[in-house]
């Protein structure tokens, strides 16, 4: 599974470039603030495992005005480092690696 380039951002962490993205439109459950925002991350130039991270905030386009602070690149960098420490191998093919971001 590869991320769509449109709407994604590049970030370099410890000399490795990753692409990350937040879904543009919320899913139905995200729109109702029943499910949290999800961030997807992949290493650039590899068709390996995608990292899917459940964030502690609501989707910014939710329909009921839930709290939606922006996802900062510094948070993405911390999440990627934590995922790598927990065993995410972005170069190896396979199913998505799921994790939950810690609440600040």
Image (cartoon, rainbow, N blue to C red):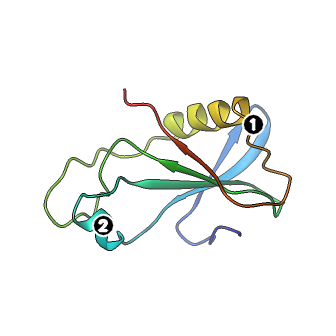
Residue 14 spot, x, y in % from top left: 75, 31
Secondary element under disc 2, as helix, strand or loop, is helix
> Pointers 1 and 2 in contact (CB under 8 A)?
no
Corner quadrant of residue 9: bottom right
Residue 44 spot, x, y in % from top left: 77, 56
Residue 87: assigned label: 1
Residue 92 spot, x, y in % from top left: 86, 54
Q: Is residue 26 above or below residue 70?
A: below
Residue at image point 35% right, 52% down: 36
Q: In the picture, which quadrant includes the C terminus?
A: top left
**First in sequence: mark 1 or mark 2?**
2
Task: Choose between 21 and 63: the one closer to the eye.
Answer: 63
| Neighbours of disc 2 within 10 Å: few (<14), some (14-19), many (20+) | few
Task: Choose between 3 and 15: the one closer to the eye.
Answer: 3
Secondary element under disc 1, as helix, strand or loop, is loop
Q: Is residue 71 above or below residue 95?
A: above
| Neighbours of disc 1 within 10 Å: few (<14), some (14-19), many (20+) | few
Q: Is residue 63 left or right of residue 45?
A: left
Residue at image point 31% right, 63% down: 30
Distance CA(mark 1)–CA(mark 2):
29 Å
Residue at image point 71% right, 29% down: 85
Corner quadrant of residue 62: bottom left
Q: In the picture, which quadrant includes the N terminus?
A: bottom right
Q: Is residue 85 above or below residue 54?
A: above
Residue underneath mark 2? 29
């Amino acid at each position: 599974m590869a991320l769509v380039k449109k709407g994604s951002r590049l970030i370099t962490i410890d000399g490795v470039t990753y692409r990350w993205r937040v879904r543009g439109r919320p899913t139905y459950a995200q729109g109702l603030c029943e499910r949290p925002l999800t961030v997807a991350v992949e290493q650039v130039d590899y068709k390996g495992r995608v990292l899917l991270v459940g964030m502690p905030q609501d989707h910014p386009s939710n329909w009921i005005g839930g709290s939606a602070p922006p996802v900062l690149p510094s948070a993405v960098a911390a999440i990627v480092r934590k995922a790598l420490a927990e065993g995410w191998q972005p170069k190896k093919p396979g199913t998505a690696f799921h994790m939950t971001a810690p609440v600040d």
